[in-house]
Amino acid sequence: MLIESLLFACLSWTAQAGELVIDDRLHHLGNDDVAQWTGSSVEPEGVRLDLSFQGAARDTEAVLSIFHHDVSDRWRIELNGHALGELLRREAAGVYHYVVPPGTLRDGSNRLSIFAGREGDDIEIGKIRLRYQSLREALRLGTVEFQVIDADSGRGLPVRITIFDAGRAPVDLYYTDEAATACRPGVCYTRDGRARLELKEGRYSAVVTRGMEWSLARQEFEVRFQGEAPKLLLELSREVDTTGYVAADTHVHTLTYSGHGDSSVEERMITLTGEGVELAIATDHNHNTDYRPVQERLQTGPFFTPVVGNEVTTAVGHFNAFPLDPNDPVPDHSLTDWIQLIQGMRQHGARVVILNHPRWPKIETGPFGSFGFDRQSGSFEQAQRLTVDGIEILNSSWLLDDPLYKFQDWFALLNRGERIYGVGSSDSHTVGAPVGQGRTYVRSSADDPAKIDVDEACRSFQRGQTSMALGIFADATLSGTTGMGGLLTSDGASLDLALRVAAPGWIRPRSAHVFQNGEEVATAELSSRAGEPFDETLQFALAAPASDAYLICVVLGEGVSGPWWEPLSAYTLGATNPIFVDADGNGRYQSPREIAAGLLRSRAEETAAALLARVDPAVGVQLIDLALDGGNVELRTWIAAAAGGAPERGPLEYLSGRLSAR
């Protein structure tokens, strides 16, 4: 009894005065025998760490300080059977801190458990200390309060608050309101513009944003331990007018239903409102996700219209399908034939099907690479055919260094006659990666984001009445009457193309490019100024095409280097969907492949070289492809005769390549 009394007296003194070393070793947890670190063993100890220690009960808060490294999946922390949360998902090695609520510690024996949510994530962990202080005391935290309002109405705005130190590194945020905010290191989304946060004492910068249609506000501030909380009032203004369109993100994930990433479905409701997404397509992997019950509970209904969707995740590609019934079985994702896969999605009610990230995870191994996509003819070696409505040209979670690379893929599909429209999305799995950073602007008669007609929106996707945006809004019309997805019958005169380009003051558009059947036919430099919103309508007088054609506009801008909206590549971008031109006046559009097929049927005595010299390059490539792939030996011989004088570029170069590969 004397020894026990002395022990408890010692523990009580420690609880008042210092810290307890629970474990001074480093451990390798996981299931891979890989030498990743120098401080722990190569062989993992398993996916669970249980530690017993002698402690003292405490009716106030305490802190666990834990060193860990390479945490990217879910690892839970329990103390005496009480959940303390999860390890912070940080790959950087460091000491991280976790609150022990009052009443969790016991006098005498205590048990700390750290275990994997699922096997496969190898981490290094250890050097665990129990600090008998509150988190505020241990880290010397101070408080800051934010209020963000609409400069025009004075009402609170859902926003993203990004906080960083002098080195532009994100800072840890403590004691956040989990019911009203979605926060991660350096990031806090708030649904009403209000947030009360605690940080380690020091000087910081905050940037407040609400997606690409709004201005940006900056504020420096200082917090002090036990000092008075600075109260920051910031204003944002709407800088990009998108009347007639709504901002859609067709590719959105949650940890709750996708099983990876870090954004719960509740947090996703708040991040969607904070980024100004107005039409939110739920696309968890092989799950029909319905946001509506959570949206109603969190009172985010006024800010966006939700749509039940599913990222049908297969061995041959990922497809976003919507709308779906949340109570129906999910579409069959075991199929490997594209046509059967997409038919299955449509049989479940999907009116829109989009092929996601066709070049992910690598250009060579994504769906296009795997199926041998020809970037000139638009064909696949394995004779697959895409019967989708759209293809992700912009995915802000996976950008290529060349902003036009995936456009060239798309041009080839259009030239082959596939009526597939371009889509922009975020593919966000986390709170920190901005949902809606990549987005699609969808033609809509509704201005109220809570009352978007989903059927109308689906028709806009099907008809190409949409544009893509990575920070820049673009819209185009021909002759003042025909918009994206529409058909203009040409009278033989020049084409008057109007391209509207708009961006907030923190994004700088630099150049506009017009493509006809995939070939650049016009360009213009843009004189945007730093800090000033840009909104100009460019006028292009284009020569009337000799045969039917389509026009697509792409606007390129400077990248955003700030942590509040940092994309994965050094550019911003806006792009239109095609406007089709009926050049022969027959009232319909013929693709380059259809035109090529007609030319082959009526070629008379004309040589192949002469024919290729007078047609559009896109038509020429399709003409070669049809001639070489057909069973007519005479036709193959006729077209092959044109290869002798192949230039460096164009259809004859394509012909030479095809012949050398045979």
Image (tube, rainbow, N blue to C red):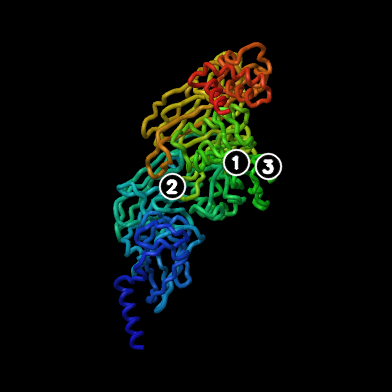
Q: Secondary structure at mark 2?
A: strand
Q: Amino acid at mark 3?
A: Gln
**Which label's residue is closer to the chain start, 3 or 1?**
3
**Which label's residue is closer to the chain start, 3 or 2?**
2
Q: Quick check: can you spot residue 266?
A: no
**Which label's residue is closer to the chain start, 2 or 1?**
2
Seen in the picture, residue 514 relative to 69 is either above or below; the reply is above
Residue 609 coordinates in the image, percent (x, y): 57, 15
Q: Are marks 3 and 2 in contact (CB under 8 Å)?
A: no
Q: Badge 2, how many Cα within 10 Å: few under 14, some, many 20+?
A: many
Q: Are marks 2 and 1 in contact (CB under 8 Å)?
A: no
Quarter of the image where the C terminus is located: top right
Question: Which of the numbered marks, if any, corresponds to residue 340?
Answer: 3
Q: Amino acid at mark 2?
A: Arg
Question: Which of the numbered marks, if any, corresponds to residue 452?
Answer: 1
Q: Badge 3, how many Cα within 10 Å: few under 14, some, many 20+?
A: few
Q: CA distance from mark 2 to mark 1?
A: 24 Å
Q: CA distance from mark 3 to mark 2?
A: 42 Å
Q: Badge 1, how many Cα within 10 Å: few under 14, some, many 20+?
A: some
Q: Nearer the viewer, mark 3 or mark 1?
A: 3
Residue at the far bottom in the pictured view: 1
Front residue of 369/278: it is 369
- Judged left or right of residue 648, residue 162 is left
Q: Secondary structure at mark 1?
A: loop
Q: Which residue is mark 2?
A: 160
Residue 74 coordinates in the image, percent (x, y): 48, 59
Q: Amino acid at mark 1?
A: Ile
Q: CA distance from mark 3 to mark 1?
A: 31 Å
Q: Quick check: can you spot residue 53?
A: yes
Quarter of the image where the N terminus is located: bottom left
Seen in the picture, residue 571 relative to 255 is either above or below; the reply is above
